[in-house]
Image (cartoon, grey):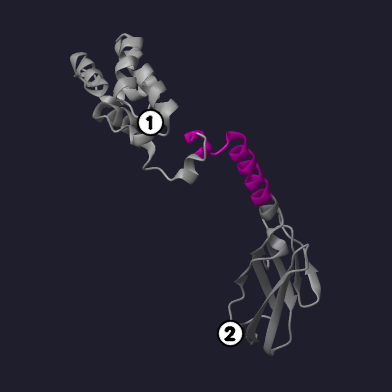
Amino acid sequence: MIKVGQKLKDARLEKNLNLREISDATKIREEFLEAIEKGEYEKLPGPSYAHGFVRNYSKYLGLPEEETLAIFRREFDTKAAYEVLPKGLLGGREFSIKRLRPNRSFILATFSILILFLFILYQYRFAFLNPSLQVFEPKKDQVITTLSVKISGKTNPDSTVFVGNEAVSLEKDGSFEKTVTFFPGKTTITIKTVNRFGKETIQEIPVTIKPGP
C-alpha cells in the first residue's frame, strides 16, 4: 500500500517542484517536509503539527486533503512515533515549537534598552575616561632660542586647559595656543586638561630656554 509520504513526493516530482519551493510557499521547514516524505514523523514537533503539515502539503500539491489524511491516519501511530521523546517534554501536552521562538516584543524591548544604555554610556563616557591631550609645541627636551615660548595642542572641546596655573581658551574643535615667557635655563612646562567630570590629564614638557645673542 502506498504511503502518504511517497504519495506527496510523487506529486511534488510530477510538478517538478523542490522542497525549498514548497517550504517557501507553505512556511513548513524543509526538514519537516523531508521527514513527512520519508515517513519519519518522530522528527516533527508534535502529532497535531504532523497532521497540519500533511494537510497543508497535500493542499498545496492539489491532492484530495481528506483522502490524503485518511492514508496518513492509517499509517501514523502517535504513541509509537513519539515514544522516543522524553515524557517530561510532552508532559501531557504537545510540544510547541513556538515556545522556542523569542517573543518579538521582548526582542524589541531588549534592543531598545541596549540602545538607550549605549547612548547614556556614550554621553557620560568622560565620567570614566581621562580627557585626551596632544601637545604640538614645544617638543620634549627642545632647545628654544627665545624667551617667549608658543605652547599649542588639542584636547576634548568641553575640557579646560591650564598652562601652569593659567587657563587657556579653547577653539571649537578643542585646539589651543598660548605664548608664555620664561627665564633662561632648563624648565618644565606643565599642561593640564580637566573635563567637566573632574577627570584630568597632565603632560610635563622639559625644555631649555637658551636665547641667542
- Which residue is painted at 32% across and 26% down in the image? 76
Q: Give the prevailing secondary structure in the magenta stretch.
A: helix
- Which residue is painted at 67% across and 50% down in the image? 117
Residue 126 in the image, given as x and y percentages of width and height? 70, 61
Picture quadrant where residue 168 is located: bottom right
> What residue is disc 1 on?
78
Task: Answer with left or right where residue 119 lies relative to residue 87.
Answer: right
In the depicted structure, whether residue 136 falls above or below residue 181: above
Earlier in the chain: of badge 2 and badge 1, it is 1
Q: Is residue 107 magenta?
A: yes
Q: Is residue 9 magenta?
A: no
Residue 204 in the image, given as x and y percentages of width and height? 66, 81
Discs 2/1, front? 1
- Disc 1 element: helix
Task: Answer with left or right where residue 137 lies relative to residue 69.
Answer: right
Instruction: Give the magenta-colored segment's residue range.
Output: 94-119
Residue 14 in the image, given as x and y percentages of width and height? 18, 14
